[in-house]
Amino acid sequence: MTTYNICLLPGDGIGPEIIAEGVKVLDAIGAKYGVGFEYEKALIGGIAIDERGTALPDDTLAIAKAADAVLLAAVGGYKWDTTDPNLPRPEQGLLGIRKGLGLYTNLRPVQIFQALSEASTLKPSVIDGVDMMIVRELTGGLYFGMRERFYDEEGAGADGKPGQRAYDTLEYREYEIERIARQAFEIARKRRSKVSSVDKANVLETSRLWREIVHDIHDRDYADVELEDILVDNCAMQLINRPADFDVVVTENMFGDILSDEAAQITGSLGMLASASLGDSTALYEPSHGSAPDIAGKGIANPLAQIMSVEMMLRYSFDMGVAADDIRRSITSVLDEGWRTRDIADAATTSDHVVGTVAMGDLVVGHL
Ligand code: IPM
Ligand code: MG
């Protein structure tokens, strides 16, 4: 029997609750398809800060590197919120593991479940047919550029005392743009063969380089794929104006962060958006949402994005497309039958169909 080693990173907030449901589904898939999954848990985020003084302990990175794939839930919480640049932050764990594992491609699929079409704030006629893949560059740009905060004369206020100054830098190298562009074109070929490349080339130098490289790669190797350039502000507007027109959306790190939250809302809830972060040698799967500290420990969090991140793991790391489809079908049935966690419940949901985290996981397993 094939056995895969999975590194589990539950993290903070609702993390431990939802990752348990992901593991439950993975175990059920293993039993059904004759594949073994073994797990090794490690610390990341706020809990790692509390126990080890750092958001990404060395052994966590080592365990993640040695695993066949990494399943992460969420990091962060009020307890560790700070604007002091000298204190550790849970998010450093997330950024550190993305960089440390070389996970430069972040895939965020935005798909509509018919049963949830009422949950969107957009009209059903607008969201009908939405099926897009956001391809976000994940290890470059503002997230990883030089940054600093310091006192100097120029920052002085009216009192003449030195004031503070801060900067972040946005930098991209040609090879970083080239490899993410190739990923986007390859993915587009397996879909509707259309790529929308998002930039701010009317203002930013990095965007002008981005646009040039994307076109070079396209003209050289992917001329069969339709390519459009779209400025990020216009893209933000078109995403809610005509979301069904988008197929593959490729963009730099920060734009991708913002646009993917916006796109998630098209589906009705950020609780429904999974993500895969791929590198050349390993991959990490996580929901796109955060740790929701306000509802942590209450057993009401929606585990579906975590479960769909398991679906992506099967598809992208283990070539188990049939099992992945099985999970997708199961979730669709559960939703069609009217089962909802609180965040996706609507006026038509009867109170006996509002379920908690564990019950939702059980329902998905039951429908496999
Ligand atoms: C995401 C999150 C992270 C990001 C945060 C938690 C650092 O918002 O995965 O989209 O900005 O990348
Ligand atoms: Mg985000």
Image: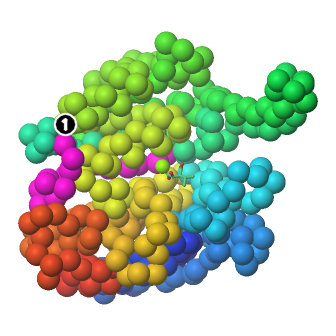
Q: Which residue is mark 1?
A: 244
Task: Please indicate whether residue 97 sits to the left or right of residue 27 in the image.
Answer: right
Q: In the image, residue 56 lies at what x, y percent?
A: 70, 65
The quarter of the displayed image where residue 305 is located = bottom left
Tell me if residue 125 can be seen: yes
Report helix, strand or loop for mark 1. helix
Q: Is residue 68 left or right of residue 24?
A: right
Query: Looking at this view, is 158 or 219 the one in front?
Result: 158
In the image, residue 58 lies at what x, y percent? 75, 68
Instruction: Identify the residue shown where x is 57% and y is 81%.
Output: 40
Query: Nearest the camera: 218 or 335?
Result: 335
> Which three-letter amino acid code belongs to the residue tagged 1?
Ala
Identify the image quadrant of residue 67: bottom right
Kindly indicate the quadrant of the structure image that contains residue 163: top right
- Magenta residues (range): 105-122
Question: Which residue lies at the image location 19% right of the left edge and 37% below the top edge?
Answer: 244
